Every structure is written in C-alpha cells, then in structure tokens.
Amino acid sequence: MNLKKYLTLTRAGIIEALQFRLSAFVMFAGNILYLIVVYFLWKAIYASAGTDVVNGMTFSDTLIYLVLATALYSFTEMYTVWEMGRAIQSGKIVLDLLKPMEYRSYLFWSYSGSFVTNFCTTFLPTFIAVCIVTHGAVPLGINLLYFAVSVVMAIVINYSIDYLVGTICLFTESIWGINIMKQVVVLLLSGATIPLAFFPDTLRRVAYFLPFQSIYNAPLTILLDRSARPETVLPVLGLQLFWCVFMVLLSKLFWKASLRQITVNGG
Amino acid sequence: MSSMIEIKNVTKEFKVLNRREGLKGSLKDLFSRDYKTVRAVDNISMTVEQGEIVGYLGPNGAGKSTTIKMMTGVLEPTSGEILVAGNVPYKNRTQNAQHIGVVFGQRTQLWWALPLVESFRILKDIYRISDADYDGMLKLYQSLVDIEPLLHKPVRQMSLGQRTLSDILAAFLHNPKIVFLDEPTIGLDVSMKAKIRTLIHALNEQKQTTVILTTHDMGDVDALCRRIVIIDKGKMLYDNDTEHLKSFFGAYRTLKIRVGGDLKEQAEQIGKHLPDCAVSADDEWISVLVNEEKQRVMDVLTQLQKEYRIRDMQLEEISTEDVIKKIYEEGVN
C-alpha cells in the first residue's frame, strides 16, 4: 500500500481546516453552550433524585463522562453523509469516482485532516481541562493506550455506518431525513447524550447488542476505568473489533451492490 | 498507432419511473412499480486513434454525457463492448482512472479552499507522478500559459475562466492517454475561449493525448477538431472529418445582396425568379442560399444583376454551425 497518496489528503485537509478559523471558533463556542446546558440539566436531575448516586454514577461522574463524550463527538464526527449527499445531488461524485482510488478511501482520507485539527483544538484542550479541574478523576495510565486503540476502531465503525447511510442517497437522491434519523439513533444508542447506565434494563441490553455503543460508550468506559486490566478491557475491544470488521464489510458490499444499480444524475 | 477507444454496438437503457402529477399522483408514485425503459444510447460504434481530437456533438439530451460516462467507467453499458486504452472501463474503474483525465465544464475537481499549487501536489501524490514528470509538466504549462499568478491563488477566488483553465491543466497533469472535456468553454469570454483552445491544441500535440470534446460551441470544433461525431436521441448520425461535413450537404453558399426598396417584398420576388434557392430577408440583407451543384453562384449573381440594382454584396461560406444546425433539425437525410 502506498501510504503517501492517502497522507497527502490528510495534509490537504489540515491546511483546508486552517483556512476556516472562524468556523473553528464558532464550533468551540457552540460546544461550550451545549456543555452549560448539560451541566444545569443534570444538576436538576440529581437535585430531584434526592441522592448523590444515581444508577451507580455520581453527579461529577456523569458530568465528566458527558463532557468527554461531547469532546469525542466533535473530534470524530465526520459529516460523511452530508458530504456524500451533496456529491451525489450535484453530480460531483462522478469526478470523485474517477480518482485512481476507491471512493470510500478517498472520502475517508479527505476528511482525516479534520481529525488532526479537531483533536488538537477540541479534544485535547477539553481533556486537559477536565483532568485539571477534577484533580485526577480521570486515571492517567495504561488506559490511555487502550483508549487510543478504542477510538481508532470507534472512528472506523462510525465512518462505516455513515457510509452505509450515505449510500442510500444513491437511491433516494435526498438525504436530509435519513441523516437526521441516523444521528438521533446513533447519538442516543451510543451513549453520547445519556450514559448507558441511565437506560432502562431492557433498552440497555439491546444497546449492548448493537454496534452504536462501540462508538462512544466503549472508548469512554475504557478511558474512565480506574482499574483498567486486560481482563476487563479486552472483551470491550474485542466486541469493537467484531463490529469494526462487520460494518466495514457490510458498508463495502452495500456500496458495491448499489453502485451497480445507479445512474449518476446531472451532466 | 493503436486504437485508444473502441466502442462496439453499445446501448444504454435507463429505467425511469412513470411519474404522475399532483399530490395524489406523487403519493401513488411512492408505491408504483410502473417503470418505462428509456434508451439513452442506441447501438453506437466508433473507434478513436491515439492523438486524435474528436468533437462529440449533439443537441441537449442526445446521450453525449451518457456515452462519456460509459467511456470513463462510471456507467455500465446495457449491451455492447467498450475498450478504453485496452481496458474495460467499468470493470477496473480505479485502474482505468490512471489513464484518463476529465473536465466537466460546470464542476471542478480542484480543492476549493486551497491555492492551485496545493491541488496539483495532491494530484501528484494521488496519481503517483514522479518528481521529474511533475516538474516537466509544470514547465510545459508555464511555456503555454502564464500560470505563475494562478498557482498561488485559492481556487475559490478564481474567475470562471481561470478555474476552467486550471481544471484543464489538472486533468492533463498525470499525462493521461485520454482526456474527456465536457463543454470546457461554457460561459467563457471570447479571449478566454481562444486561450483554452490554444492550450488544448498544444497539449494534444505535445503529449499525443487523445481528446474527446463535447461542446455546443462550433468555434471549439472549427479550432480543434478534424473529426466529429454527431449523435441525437441516442443514435449516431454522423462520424467523419469536418471537411467532409460541408460537402455532405451539397456545396451550399450564401449570397447576400443589398437592394433598394422594401427588402421583404423584394425577397419574395427574387424567390419567384430563383425556384432552386432559399431566399430570406433581414433588416439589412437579402440572403440567397445557393446549392452550387445545381446552380453556380456567379450565374445567380448575373441573373440578379440584370433585374435589380445591387448596391452591395457578400458571399458567405456555409459555416459548421449552419450544417450542424441543419443536421440537428432535419437529420442526415
């Protein structure tokens, strides 16, 4: 594999992202606003519960989890579905298909530059801030390594789900509704908006059988696990790996089958 | 010389849903299985040799883009065979991409926010162009057009003309065997059009690149193409050189004369005198379309001179545009 042709896309993505400074600031401000809402919402929830520990999590546990989930979201979210929808509707996809590279890789690596910039501008600062403010509530040890592996797999799973949904656009030629639905399902069932511990038992069990929890719940659990041992971490990573392989294959097959069916519009 | 493109009896059909009108109809359409088959390309065959520039013409909706998409491998033909640079394009689209370049007039493949040179560097890595080839190509570009000011300008700040020029340079960058240009001069001013024509001509000559050019601008055809292919409603109407095209429709020439009095009335009278010619009048001229196989222009002129006081005259060769228009409207026969 010639890595250079992929990394050049990453590099372009970084330069491109740096051109739009204002959008980075606006996104940052938006995240802060969201976190303020989260803070007061959960404060009210804990106040009305009357106890310090709800579903095995204290207020600060919950808050740390959600702050990191938000940071992780703004770092890994790829907007692949929008990108594909736009390319398909405008017909630009024809040009992308004619690159000497699979469309799937082309799209992924074109976006990968944002991982680097978003990691540096949102996730890393948030993570450091959380560590300082909470005086070591986040364990810093081997779990960081597990976390890194976990996040990479989470990104791949998330991308595959996006790619799968984006492929549907080849048939519908409109993507708005489908994408909104996807976003709600993913954000809820992955534990990005509400920790899975707060789910009713049945729903939680269902959620564990779905790929979504591997995107946010799995890496965050690993990161916040104070006693990270191979016996507890490996099953989580194993499950992620399974979904990784499964979703990649599924989205690839679906794309391949769909592409045969399509007529590319425009032109 | 080997054939770059071989197309044999290619047909492409689309299934289109029969849409109904109104809200009720739209709701019914959600569950409809009522498809009709549209034949966008109907039994087309042609062979293109290396280094040729072929004008691919036809009215809007004739099936040009569909053919191009099949040649690039984005669409699979319903039946028939296509070979592009020895490959079946839709089977190994990704490998095939290495040998072809495309420009679609209204879209850009360049990186919107970045200076042009960054787009070139990305393409260099994606297409795995060696440093020597890349530098050589940039030098060639520099000798053909003044690209230095363009290189450091973000694509989004370019004018349409500059962007199209850049897109063409980008399509040729990896020295492909074939370049497909889909309406490259659409919406450009006269001087930019001329610049782009010169560029395409030079690149074709220097690199022996085969070029398939679709356009509605006959200026492009006159400047670049020695051979044209015309299709309409998916069917091939004409495939030959442009010289042949003119004689194909008889040796038509237009004689324009200016006489005194009301031009419309005069034109009618002249029409009666010359039953073999089509006579029409505008605000300034009376035009007489003469078929030289039947009647010589000189004879017509002498005849007219006997009866009318001709103040001024012009002789026009029939233009490619006129011929194409005639083909679009009437077909070959």
Image (spheres, coloured by chain):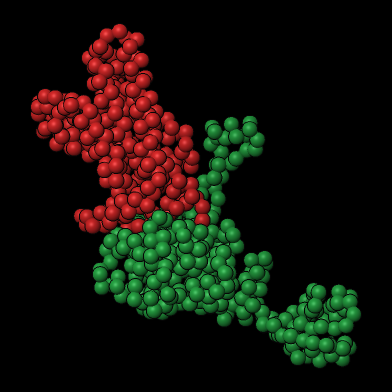
Give the total of numbered labels. 0
Image vertical order of residue A180 relative to residue B210, above or below? above
Residue closest to the far top:
A50
Query: Relative to residue A88, is residue B116 depicted above or below?
Result: below
Confirm whether residue A160 shows in the render: no
In the rendered image of the structure, the colour used to display chain B is green
Residue B218 rendering spot, x and y as whole percentages: 59, 72
The tint of chain A in the picture is red
| Residue under the image location 27 percent in, 9 percent down | A51
Question: Is residue A181 among the parts visible in the rendering?
Answer: yes
Residue A190 in the image: state x and y as whole percent: 30, 27
Q: Position of residue B179 (x, y in %)?
A: 41, 67
Tell me the residue at 29%/73% (across/down).
B135
Of B84 and A252, the residue lying toward us? A252
Q: Quadrant of residue A30?
A: top left
Q: Is residue A204 above or below residue B326?
A: above
- Give the x, y percent position of residue B282: 80, 74
Classify residue A248 by image quadrant: top left
Residue A34 vs B222, above or below: the answer is above
Q: Residue at image x 77%, y 80%?
A: B288
Q: Residue at x 46, y 60 (%)?
A: B157
The quarter holding residue A166 reads top left
Which sits in the foreground, B108 or A121? A121
Foreground: A50 or A238? A50
* Quadrant that contains the N terminus of chain A: bottom left
